[in-house]
Structures are given as structure tokens and as C-alpha cells.
Amino acid sequence: MTNVTDQDRVLIFDTTLRDGEQSPGATMTHDEKLEIAELLDDMGVDIIEAGFPIASEGDFKAVSEIAQRAKNARICGLARANFADIDRCWEAVKHAEKNRIHTFIGTSPLHRAIPNLTQDEMAEKIHETVSHARNLCEDVQWSPMDATRTEWDYLCRVIEIAIKAGATTINIPDTVGYTAPAESADLIRRLIETVPGADEVIFATHCHNDLGMATANALAAVAGGARQIECTINGLGERAGNTALEEVVMALRTRNDIMPWKTGIDTTKIMHISRRVATVSGFPVQFNKAIVGKNAFAHESGIHQDGMLKNRENFEIMRPEDIGLSGTSLPLGKHSGRAALRDKLETLGYEVGDNQLKDIFVRFKELADRKKEVFDDDLIALMSADDATNDHLQLVSMKVTCGTGGQAEATVELEVDGKDVIATEHGDGPVDATFKAIRVIYPNKAHLQLYQVHAVTEGTDAQATVSVRLEEDGMIATGQSANTDTVVASAKAYISALNRLIMRREKAGPGADAREISYKDLT
Amino acid sequence: MTNVTDQDRVLIFDTTLRDGEQSPGATMTHDEKLEIAELLDDMGVDIIEAGFPIASEGDFKAVSEIAQRAKNARICGLARANFADIDRCWEAVKHAEKNRIHTFIGTSPLHRAIPNLTQDEMAEKIHETVSHARNLCEDVQWSPMDATRTEWDYLCRVIEIAIKAGATTINIPDTVGYTAPAESADLIRRLIETVPGADEVIFATHCHNDLGMATANALAAVAGGARQIECTINGLGERAGNTALEEVVMALRTRNDIMPWKTGIDTTKIMHISRRVATVSGFPVQFNKAIVGKNAFAHESGIHQDGMLKNRENFEIMRPEDIGLSGTSLPLGKHSGRAALRDKLETLGYEVGDNQLKDIFVRFKELADRKKEVFDDDLIALMSADDATNDHLQLVSMKVTCGTGGQAEATVELEVDGKDVIATEHGDGPVDATFKAIRVIYPNKAHLQLYQVHAVTEGTDAQATVSVRLEEDGMIATGQSANTDTVVASAKAYISALNRLIMRREKAGPGADAREISYKDLT
């Protein structure tokens, strides 16, 4: 009985950095992973699955460093069912005060067929690998992948083997997002009733949202006896994503009358981390997303004149403050001082040192000169802007002419490793011409996968945030930039993405960080 | 016993045009409403809630015209609990071959408090209004708003009254998105067991997604005995939106083993209507949205090298073809002819006459000259581009200069009611300068609420789709435009939104279409 907790406490296991990060195009840089891990730790996540150490050198380094820096959270790494994976995982997580090895194998008929193992052979492999993990680490999580499509008798048998071999958490993944609430609750309940030793471990639920029911399925599993929910911020993840952390946490809080379980999450930190994950992953949140969508707390205008003001409870079951959405926060302006800026940044969840504040204040003043009112979202964009000091490529200046009378023309001046280079190119529109000029200055064959612009706040003088995603030889890098000039922001975002590609190429050697091992590779 | 159907058939009641359209900023034009209604009718939706006739002249006209054009669907309008609303609703829906009046009142203690009615007074009002509706229309739906927070005994009492007064469908709304699956199923089950006459009507479920469980709650209600699901395309709706049509329909289809109910929806039409609703509402769908998100069928790249190709079923529970996503469709190019274009458009769900094809072919050739490969999404953007022939304001030409060396400059030439006007303005960035020049040419005080750019396809020569949302005196208008030049697309989208504002002002007289009545006004 290793880590069974109060019966009314549900552990939150966040896998934004593993299952979330592996969604096509959501790749994060090393620094971004460290930042998100710190935010997860701060908000009270119990277990952070920080990556899949054997998948790449980058994953290994990220998990190791997150393990070293963790304050309260348990740090977990993923490993397939073989000794090399498990050893590599342990090498990365061993630095954490609290650590966990998470090993898995696909147990459904479809998944057994690929390594071509009989039921007995796979059972033996599970026994060996879980025992090996437990010899290294006292906290071991085991997952029968595609559990919801595994034969009942065999599922009970392999779970019993894993428990006997020392697993302390048994995770039941609904790998293809196939289950429904009643079935999800029933599966966990029957497993706990049936499998010998089940009462000595924690059962976890890992749901995918393919049919739109990940949140309900996870909560149903808790009703069935699971005491760990695996989830991601914004429901990030492959295909339709994973259970969204913010949804299960707020549902448990709001409907504690019928779901009497608690988590350790500080819900007021939800909005900030949601925005950061949307930015660094390049996966925006839709307006009508539950809890963290722009409209989640917006009521139709008519209502403000009647019911809503008369009785707020009529249409509100949660308060914006509960998730860290400040209600009517006043914008800053060009006369706002350093102290006001620091106060505001703290309210928004940023703690800045004196030197950093100096830099930010300069950029804030520049922005306030161009924009009458600087809103919270403007500051968040400002804080997210890349720190370009160590970059290979830096924008010196640019000039673009475009319109309806023919091709656009862009003249771009970049500093490439300290030397200024200028190029002028024509293209279909200002962005195409600009990107062409950059490619002339710094030739590359990166493919533009995604280009996206959002106005950060309202009004025509709003800053635009541009996200650019580039792909080269299987490596993906995303760059962002915010500026009141969309074309300048586009150039900066493109340059930032290029800098990231260059950095990753250099750090990892040719192709090394192009994750060659998928967590679904079956061994 | 008016419209009770097979016990295994679930009716799909779509409220994209009523509950969806009322989400802040999602307002659609008259023509867009007609188009969406036609697509809903074509895909096999059983009941289309087309609007709230008394709310505005625009709503009334839209419901009336949709009623006249409906082929198979039953057309429904919303009405509060008073005779004027119900009469106006009937005036609009009576043109349909199959019609329905949907009347509602808030029955929870919080909602009873606002009109300050006792339980008995409200019961009397329900009897009168439902009887009145039934005298006009043989198909009447009644909803106790905020049912999930209404006292059990009172809820049973008012439902019984509504049934006796002639309601043929009883809808149980979870107005604030407060319920959870087990509770949702249980509520319907107990109501059907308890309320006299319940077996002679259809029970409907209407869920909101505030806690991320709308889909699961709706399906649970069906398990409890409901036989009508109220939903919207893309889950559009206030706050976190409504149950998503595509999710409940695909869940019922995919898990028919445990949810043995069928709908009449042609699922292959899902993707097309999802894209159209995203475009006309200005509410994009997030990448990781279930069923219709860009990533919903995208698997992490690694997988393509192993499990996925070996056995598609491993990770796929639905096929992209099932929702009308064509798999590996070849792009068109500058050498593609008219027949190829027509074929492709038909595959994408567009039926075009010869004259229309001629126009589209010209625009297609222009695009193919600028872009090597024209993908499906490029064509969808092309088809969505506004037909500007009757507009007050038209772009003649524009030229913009911007960059890092100071303010951007835009020279814009517009045709305003047949006369050319030119203006040059400076601004923070090319978009700000352009919008300023347009405002000098056509002075207005519309506020820019939303500005958004998406690349339609990949590559730097991709078309950009720009959405602009303007607000003026409570009227909201959205304009879209696609162009390989982002700044030109921005100007066109802004002009299109302005044209819509002008049109609505003229058609409706001052302020008339600014919905002054909310469906939540309590009478």
C-alpha cells in the first residue's frame, strides 16, 4: 500500500508535456516545457508526466531538468515495456524528490497482434518489466493500452500481474476515446471488485475526447472508484485531445454535491496556464470552449438588462474569479509607472525581478505610445514575446509595399550571426514577399505549416499576435510575436521559428530531436 | 399521442439558428440563415429551431422564409409564455408543411422570483399559454427553463399541466450547464415514471457545455428515455455552447452497441456544414475539437510508420469519410478545366449552375495563377467570398507601405454608391492605416470587436482568410474575405462588415434589428 490517499481525494495527473505535446504540431521548446512544468507544479498538480525520456535527447533533457526543479509535484516519465526504456526513464526522473516510472503495453487483441505475442508471452513481459521498474523506483504506474477494447478476463489477469510485480498505480486508458460514462464507471468498479490486490493500488483514468465525452468519462471513472485523473491543459492532445484539466477540476468543484471528491488544484491559476499552453503549443482555444474559452463567461447582451443583473446566480454557476479571470480590471496607459506595471503583472501571475522589470517597462512604454489603453491581454502578449538576445537571426529593419496594383515588395534587413544582410523580394501579398526575402537572406527548406493572426484586444490599434509553425525534416518549430504591425509581427514570428529550428538542429545533431520513437511504437 | 416515434429513433432538433446564433458575436445575416437552414434540412435534421420570431423583424423574416422553403424538416420558432409571442411565432412558422411552436418559462425558484409569480400563478400561466399555442398548432413543445434547478414536485406538476394543455414535446433544459450524466439520465427516467401522461409525449434534452459534459448529458438523457436531442453545429451557443450535433450523432453511430438508438442524419454532410457555420458565425473550431477539429483525424506522425498502417483499426474508431472528409483528394492547378472544377465543387457539397460556375471559374483561374496548388480548403474559401455586386462600398484599389521605420501609410480608393473616393492615412501597422483610410472615406463609429487571420492551406503563398467583426449601437456584423494578400483581405473583410451594417440599418430602421428582446427576458 504505497500511495493510497483519502477516499475523497482525487489525484490530478497532468500529461500536457507528454500526451499533449505529442499532438501533431504542438511541439514545445525546452524552455517552454520548463515554464509549463513550473506553472503545473505551482497550481497544485499532483503528478506531472514530463515526457517520454527515450523518445529523443530533447525529451530526456526536459524530463531530467523538470525533475531537478520540481517543488511539490511528483515527476513521471513514460517508458514502453522494455528494460532500455525503463532505465532511461529512471535516469531522467531519479533527480526528483518524488518520482514515478510509467510503463505501458497494448493489451487488446489488435495491439497484441503487432508484436505478435500470445497472451502468456505478454503476461510474462508485463511481469518482468514492472518488476524491473519497481526495483528502480518505489512509485510505478502501469497502463494496459487500449484497455477499453481488451478482453475482460485477460485485462483482470494482466492487472493482477502488474500489481503483484509492484505497480502502485494502475491506469486504465481509453486510448481511442471509445467509451461512454456508464461503461467507464462500470469498468473501474468491476476491476476493483474483481482483481486481487486492487484495493492496495490507485486506479487511474485516461480518456480521449474523440466522441466529446472525455470529461464525463473521467468523472464517471472516479464515481466507479478511480482516484487519479489523467488530463491536459485545454484538453491538448492527439486527435480530439485528452480530458481537459480545467473541466474536471471545475466540475468537481461546482458539483461537489453529487461528486464529493476534492483535488489539490488552485483553480485561480487555470486561466493563466491555459493562455500559456495555447501560446506555446500554437493550439488556440475556441471561443465556446468550456471554462477557458473567451465566451465561457460571456452572456448574451440582452440579459445584462434584466435577469443577469437582478440575480447573478440565474445564469452563473461559476464565477470568473474562480479561474483567475479578473473581472473589470482597468487598463494601463502611457502615464502608468513602474509600480503599477509590476502590480498588474503580479495579478496576471508573472513574478519579475528588478532587471527584468526594467526591460519590460521599456517595451511597455513603446506599446503605450502606440496604443492608448494597454489591456491585460496586451501585457500577456508582451510577456510572451520572445527574448531574442541569443538568436542567430535578428530583424534589423524592414519595409513592405503592397496593395491591389500587382505584387507586394518587401525589403528586409537581418543580422545573421552579427553581420547585416539585406534582401528585396516580391511575392503574393506582404507576408509572402517578407518570408521570401528572409529565405533569400537565410536559405532554408522549412515548410510553413501554420500561419495565424489574432488581435489581442479590441479596436483597430490592437496588437496582433502572429503564430508561425515551420517543419523541416520532421522537426517542427513554432514562433510567436506580437506587434501593432501585422507584417512586422509576421516577420518576427517567422524569424523566431527559424531560430528555434536552428537551435534544435545544433543542440541535437542532425535529426536527433525529430522524435523517431512514438509512444505507440509497439515493442 | 401526436408524434411519438419508434422507441429506437432519436429526433435531432437543431438550434444553431436560435440558441447558437444568440451567442455574443455569432449573429448571422438573413442569407446565411437561409443557407444553414437548407444544409440542416438536407442532412436530415428532424426539427430546425429557426429563430425567435418576436425578438426582431429580422428573426421573424428568417423564420418565415425558412418555413416556406423547408423540404423535410419541421420548422420551429421560440416564444415566451405570452400570447403575443406565441401568435407572432405562429405567423412565422405556419408557412411550413410541418411546424412547431416552442414556448418556455423559467420554473426554478430563481426564475420564478423575477416575474414575482407564485407557484399557482405560474401554473395557471403555463396552462393558458400552452393551450393557446396548441389551438394554433398541432405540434407544441414546452420547456421549463432551468429545469435541473427546479423543485421536483413542482417540476412534475407543471409538466403534467403542459401535457394536459396539449404539449406534444416536453423539453428539459439544463440552462446553466449544471448537470452530470447520471443525474441527467435519472431526471428524465423519473419524470417519465412519475408524470401522468408522460408516455404520450416525447421528452427532449437540451444541454449546455459549461462543465464540458453537454454531449454525455444529452446521451445519458436518451438512456433515461428522452427521444429528442437539442443541439447545434460545432456546439455553437452562449458561453461554452450547446451539445454539438456532430458529437451526439457520431457517438450514437460509433457506439450503437451500448447506445442502441438511431438518428436520421446523413453523417457525410457534417464536415461541410461545420465549416460553413464556423465561417458565417466567425467562431472558428479548435484543432482538437471532437469530430470536426482539424486534428480530429490526425495521428502523430510516428504512428504512420507502424501500428497505424499495419492496422487502421488500432487507433481509428471512425473513418474520415463518415463525416465527409475526403481522404487524399488531389489539388487542382492552373491547368485544371471547368469540368474538374465542377466535379471538385460537387464533392465538397456545392451545387453550382452554369452561370455561377463561369464566375467561379474566373476567380479560380486568378487564384491558380498566384498559387501553384489549389486545395479543397482554398476552394471552400473561394466559395465563401462575398458576392459584392449590390454593396454600397466597394474596394477599387489600395496601396500600403509599412515596416519598422515609422508609421504605416495606406492609400485606399473606394466606390461609395457609384462614386470613387480616395484617402491616405497613417496608422500603427498596415491594417490600422487601411481601416483609418476607410473610415475617412466612409465615416462611421463601428467598433472593431474581432480581427482574425487564418491561412487557408499550407505554404507561404497560402490564401489568408480574414474575419472582421464590427459593433455599432448594439448591431453586430461580421465580414470575411480570402486573398493571398493579408492586407487586401483585411480591407475587403472590413468593407464587407460595413456593408452588412449599412444593409441592416436600412432594412430594419434605426436599431430595429438590435435584438431588444432576449429569450431570457422573463414575462
Image: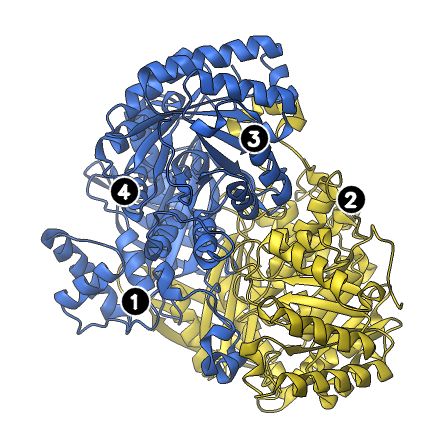
Chain colours: A blue, B yellow
Pointer 3 local density, CA inside 10 Å: few below 14, some 14–19, many at least 20: few
Q: Disc 4 marks which residue?
A: A38
Residue B94 coordinates in the image, percent (x, y):
85, 80
Residue A114 coordinates in the image, percent (x, y):
61, 15
Q: Quadrant of residue A200?
A: top left
User: From the viewer's perspective, is the residue at label 4 or at label 1 nearer?
Assistant: 4
Q: Are marks 4 and 1 on the same chain?
A: no
Amino acid type of the residue that numbered disc 2 sits on in the rendered structure: Pro
Chain letter, disc 1 residue: B
Secondary element at tag 2? loop
Q: Closer to the camera, A253 or B25?
A: A253
**Label 4, label 3: how many angstroms apart (C-alpha)?**
38 Å
Q: Residue at point 59% right, 47% down?
A: A213
Secondary element at tag 4? helix
Pointer 2 local density, CA inside 10 Å: few below 14, some 14–19, many at least 20: few
Chain letter, disc 2 residue: B
Q: Residue at point 66% right, 50% down?
A: B247
Q: Disc 3 marks which residue?
A: A193
**Label 2, label 1: how many angstroms apart (C-alpha)?**
63 Å
Q: Are marks 3 and 2 in contact (CB under 8 Å)?
A: no
Q: Disc 1 marks which residue?
A: B407
Chain letter, disc 4 residue: A
Q: Closer to the camera, A122 or B247?
A: A122
**Is B178 situated above or below B324?**
below
Comes first in the chain, label 4 or label 3 = 4
The answer to whether residue A53 is visible is: yes
On screen, residue B394 versus residue A133, left or right, reads right
Q: Disc 2 marks which residue?
A: B260
